[in-house]
Image (cartoon, coloured by chain):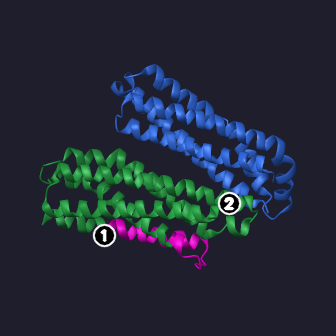
Amino acid sequence: MSPLFQNFLILHVLSGLLGIVSFAAVLLGLMKNASLRKLKITSFFGLLAFLVSWFYGGYYYAIYYGDKVKPLIKAGRYSWAHNVIMETKEHIFLFLPFLAAVLFLVIWLAGEDINKEQKLKKGTTALALSIVILGIAITLMGLAISGAAQ
Amino acid sequence: MSWYAILIIIHIIGAILGVGAATASDITFLKSLKKGVFSKPGFNFLKKMSSIVWLGLIFSAFSGIGFFIFYRLNFLGPAVSYSPRLWAHLTIALVVFFNGLAMHWKVFPVLESFIDKPFSLDFIKKSKIVFSTGAISIISWYFTFVLGAWHELNLSYLGIMSVYFLLILGGVLIANLIGKRIIHL
């Protein structure tokens, strides 16, 4: 693998993880009535991280994975790692940046209402938790797919 | 220094912070139980330790994922990446994470509401979640710590997780029994 694609893969994984950590911080912040400033900053960085992860992952997948990695996985004992897990991942990952964008916009537009209105608070907390759980699931899928390549 | 060595160092730092802070938190909490009252400095200490636990988890998460990237870039394949011990380690790390969220959501508000108040029947009613999450935290941190170090372990994923869940079950029961006994004394 060329250094370009190695770096793209590393950036894809690390920025995705940064996105999950950021939205975990948003989730904790919502639970603890953190300042609006903290919520705004962490949700912004989380969204940015997911967008960066999408870009690098997309480029790697389109230009390198299909030709070089997919045949290796499909030829091995763990072909389901591509046939099932990658096929699932490449569709459901799309929820992440859009859910992240929704939460980011709600936090920036709703302002202090987030800590005052209980229904809004519950909704944003549930959304943040969904983003974290989905992000973790996507990460585990990525580990399973990468692990099958030899 | 190789990238692998750097990842190991960061991962060990994460483990030290997580295991250490979780241990200090549990000892502080037990001392408060024996005194019969939960003080403001005690609560603030728990909050600080909680931040250190999260920091340890972040270090462990990034370096842990770093190991998987290392295995992938070196094409070590399923023999390494699909190791039952590794996936059990990962599963328990997730338990630590979600248990931590539960502690912040449910336990810290309970403890905060009982600052400088003697432990009453009201606290005993709410104490199950406090003792249970504390037990899950400390058992999970130590179990995953041992799992990470025990490279020669040759058990299936289900075997490892069965041992873990038995320890959790026992730990939660014992924590609740001992905790309520201390309060009543």
Q: Residue at x 44, y 71 (%)?
A: B166
B56 lies left or right of B31: right
Relative image position of residue B86 (x, y in whole percent) = 60, 66
Residue flagged by tag 1: what amino acid is it?
Ile
Task: Name above or below for residue A107 compared with residue A72.
Answer: above
Residue B100 place in picture, x, y as percent: 41, 52
Instruction: State the residue in front, A8 or A36.
Output: A8
* Residue A43 - label: none
Q: Which chain is blue?
A: A
**Secondary structure mostly seen in the magenta stretch:** helix
Q: Nearer the viewer, residue B177 or B149?
A: B149
Which quadrant is home to the C terminus of chain B?
bottom left
Q: Residue at x 50, y 55 (%)?
A: B59
Q: Find chain B in the image and tell me its colour.
A: green
Q: Which mark is residue B174?
A: 1
What's the amino acid at mark 2? Phe
Few, some or many C-alpha atoms within 10 Å of disc 2 (few <14, some 14-19, many ≥20)? some
Residue B70 is marked as 2
Is B178 situated above or below B117? Answer: below
Chain letter for mark 1: B
The nearer-to-camera label among 2 and 1 is: 2
Residue A81, x across and y down, in percent: 75, 56
The answer to whether residue B175 shows anywhere in this view is: yes
Q: Earlier in the sequence, mark 2 or mark 1?
A: 2
Residue interval drawn in magenta: B147-174
